[in-house]
Image: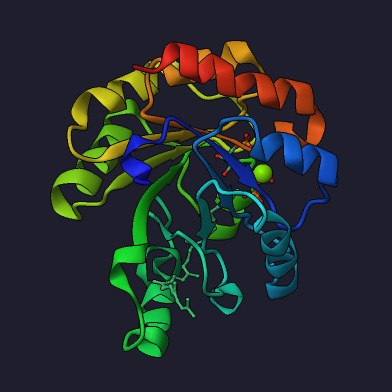
């Protein structure tokens, strides 16, 4: 189990309701992993509840940390976002500093995977929360990708369009400048067609909202990515 081989992941929002039947279909879909994450209404209780329901399945489960008080043991990885295009240092390194002050002695660093986010949909909750500067040129975004790979040496650069399908020309240009850092793409994948477009470029595609809007379409994205990715 290595996140560097993942091509498709489902992102489950602990603040949203999902039936046992739909959760079962997601977990048996042959996706590579489940990412648990959201940008608001995330609590220890709703993470615990969702995690307990996932125990019966064998696929990797990752907690994408957005609130330090909601971190619990037992995940395969902890993905730690840093929002590179935020104007507020709190979301780049401030909360991280606080968390490491508190847990630094007991952290298993091998389980922590930092993600360099570049949030490009100004309307999404994560952009508003983190005061992301989304009005960026192609050159700006490419520079963030290079910053992630060559300066901060982050294992993941995450182009986040949460809630809308992004500019695939831009995603391609970003992919072309990355060699070691893995490119995650997320946002607006709502069908086999959009999944194929994103998977033809990004290393890993993340599928979120459609799980709650149209489970059939969500499931179709898994096969679509498998057929497209190398
Ligand atoms: C006991 C034990 C196991 C201890 C381990 C402790 C541990 C793992 C500590 C972690 C150390 C550490 C460095 C933590 C960082 C803490 C932290 C809070 C960092 C800030 C993270 C951050 C920048 C969050 C901002 C929001 C964000 C980017 C969230 C990512 C997910 C995301 C974008 C979801 C989409 O949100 P959604 O709600 O779906 O939005 P839409 O509705 O618009 O789609
Ligand atoms: O919810 P969607 O738009 O699929 O985006 C997935 C993910 O990138 C959200 O963090
Ligand atoms: Mg969402």
Give me the residue at 62% from left, 57% from top.
39
Give me the residue at 29% from left, 70% from top.
109
Image-quarter location of ligand 3:
top right
Instruction: Give x and y (percent) for residue 34.
Output: 57, 46
Quadrant hosting residue 44? bottom right
Whether 150 is drawn above or below 66: the answer is above
Give me the residue at 33% from left, 74% from top.
108
Instruction: Give x and y (percent) for residue 71.
Output: 55, 74
Would residue 151 be found to the left or right of residue 188 on screen?
left
Q: Is residue 84 visible?
A: no
Q: Is residue 21 visible?
A: yes
Count how many numbered circles sit on residues in the image.
0
Which color scheme is applied?
rainbow
Quadrant hosting residue 124? top right
Between residue 68 and residue 134, name the one nearer to us. 68
Whether 127 is drawn above or below 14: the answer is above
Give me the residue at 20% from left, 55% from top.
152
Instruction: Give x and y (percent) for residue 137.
Output: 35, 30
Would residue 155 be found to the left or right of residue 75 on screen?
left
Between residue 80 and residue 98, name the one nearer to us. 80
Instruction: Give x and y (percent) for residue 143.
Output: 23, 38
Looking at the figure, which quarter contains the C terminus?
A: top left
Whether 195 is drawn above or below 53: the answer is above
Would residue 143 be found to the left or right of residue 22 on screen?
left
Quadrant hosting residue 30? top right
Between residue 64 and residue 119, name the one nearer to us. 64
């Amino acid at each position: 189990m290595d996140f560097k081989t993942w091509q498709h992941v489902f992102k489950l929002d602990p603040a949203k309701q999902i039936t046992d039947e739909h959760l079962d279909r997601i977990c048996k879909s042959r996706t590579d992993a489940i990412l648990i994450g959201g940008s608001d209404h995330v609590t220890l209780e709703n993470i615990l509840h969702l995690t307990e329901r996932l125990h019966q399945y064998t696929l990797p489960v990752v907690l994408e940390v957005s609130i330090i008080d909601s971190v619990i043991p037992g995940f395969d990885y902890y993905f730690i976002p840093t929002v590179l295009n935020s104007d507020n240092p709190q979301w780049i390194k401030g909360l991280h500093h606080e968390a490491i002050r508190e847990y630094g002695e007991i952290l298993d660093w091998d389980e922590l995977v930092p993600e360099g986010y570049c949030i490009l949909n100004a309307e999404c909750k994560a952009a508003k929360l983190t005061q992301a500067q989304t009005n960026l040129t192609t050159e700006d975004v490419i520079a963030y990708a290079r910053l992630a790979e060559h300066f901060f040496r982050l294992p993941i650069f995450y182009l986040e369009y949460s809630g809308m399908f992004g500019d695939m020309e831009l995603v391609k240009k970003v992919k072309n400048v990355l060699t070691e850092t893995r490119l995650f793409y997320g946002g607006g994948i709502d069908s086999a067609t959009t999944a194929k477009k994103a998977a033809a470029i990004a290393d890993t595609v993340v599928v979120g909202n459609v799980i709650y809007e149209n489970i059939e379409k969500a499931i179709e994205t898994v096969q679509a990515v498998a057929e497209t990715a190398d």
